[in-house]
Amino acid sequence: MIKRWYLLMLLFALLPVFCDHAQGRPPAEVNVPELNSIADSNLSAGAVSGLLHSFSPLAQIYLNHLGLQDKNNNGTIDKDAGEGYEEFIAKYGNADTGFHANGIIHGAGNGKLEEPEIINHYYLHIRFNPDFEEETAAIENAVKAYIYANNLPLVWLDDEQGTAMNAVNRILGAGWQNKKLTEDETVSMFQQVTKAMNIRGLFGIPNNTGYYLLPELIDKKAGYCFEVAQFGFWFFSQLNINVIVVAAALNPSLVHGVVKLNNSNTIIDYFGTSNTYKVPVNQWKNLNPILSIGEYYAVEARRKKSIGDAEKSVIYYKYNISNICYLMELYADSPNRNDREIIALGEFFLNNTDIPGMMVSTDHQIGEWKNHFAYMLSILVESYSATGNRNGFNNIERLFNQYYSDDPKVKPFLDYYRF
């Protein structure tokens, strides 16, 4: 067999976060049993592609409390379908503005509310808004309860022992989170805390070294930029300050994560890495808490070469080419190769991605996206050939010729698998 010539470039993607804003364990009466069946149990090959056409387990909580219902089970909230699209926009504002994925904005104004659009809109415009206190309280409690009950990674949530809260209490004194402060005062307080903690920056690639959860970051006082940004998200959330973690590729080999205060668009960069790059506020990409869970699993999947973690990374971050491509690779190299599942994953990406836009992106990571895409196409060629799917093969051949015609290895590779 001719070996796939494009090595999958596992440059890590920086991550999003979220946190709780209420202290202690969530109320016992909060429960979401209808979601538990598709939580974070181990999945076998062949189970993931079907879940791509539905909302992730955590996203279901937001839908339930924001008047949305995916009646046709296609994984989006559709306009003119009685699913709550119009009512949501009328009440909470236009969320059909697209979302960043693979270097470009997807889904803007397409009459669909995709999962990232809904979750981003909640954290940007609904959470802690005085007009939507009921929705905020319900979602925060239900999400927190679900994460604890299902042992999801505490990427942006304190543990039940209060490791993060106790650490900050030792610096600021108990009750600091109950103060009514200006945004400037909260920033000064955060700087006081991080200076006292003296968190040391880590170097290298998380895929090799692992990913610290929030309690681990507090205990070890060391972390990557996105882990410290997640702590910032937790901190400001305790004070009901509307924040989100954002990231940008500062150059082709450096992706940086920081926390942004949404009301003022203020960037808080603990390490100061972005200061010399002068990144405009509108070029920072929103990375919401659900995507951060997907990226945690993506890092663990690469570190452990774990199919189970790779599957979870796709469930929580299904529009990310690196996550889908890596899972396809693991399936392709498995002794029990499942070509049907590989094809379903690849076709989901092709059908839900603006490929021409991605391939001309000016994002610093464009080289990574192109390498991932070529690798994905090569895996699909193998699977279409193995299953005798001529239409699929012809489509991939067209894409190869359209985007990689200058590579002399393309024609021999396609000829080898032609049937």
Image (spheres, grey):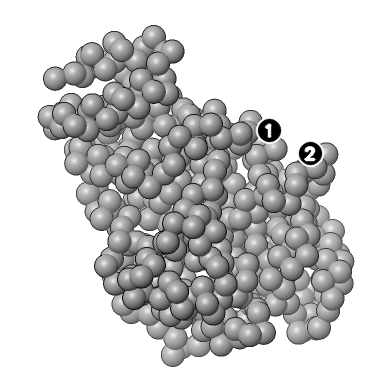
User: Which of 169/388 is in front?
Assistant: 388
User: Which of 102/104 is in front?
Assistant: 104
At 79% from the left and 73% from the top, the residue drawn is 170
Q: Is residue 346 above or below residue 81?
A: above
Counting every numbered tag in the picture gives 2
Rendering coords of residue 200 (x, y %):
75, 48
Quadrant, the N terminus: top left
Rendering coords of residue 312 (x, y %):
38, 54
At 61% from the left and 55% from the top, the residue drawn is 286
At 40% from the left and 83% from the top, the residue drawn is 31
Rendering coords of residue 74 (x, y %):
30, 61
For residue 5, side relative to residue 244 (left or right): left
Tag 2: amino acid = Tyr
Q: The residue tagged with tag 2: helix, strand or loop?
A: helix
- Contact between labelled residues 2 and 1, with CB atoms less than 8 Å apart: yes
Label 2 sits on residue:
277
Rendering coords of residue 61 (x, y %):
43, 75
Query: Which of disc 2 and disc 1 is earlier in sequence?
Result: 1
Tag 1: amino acid = Asn
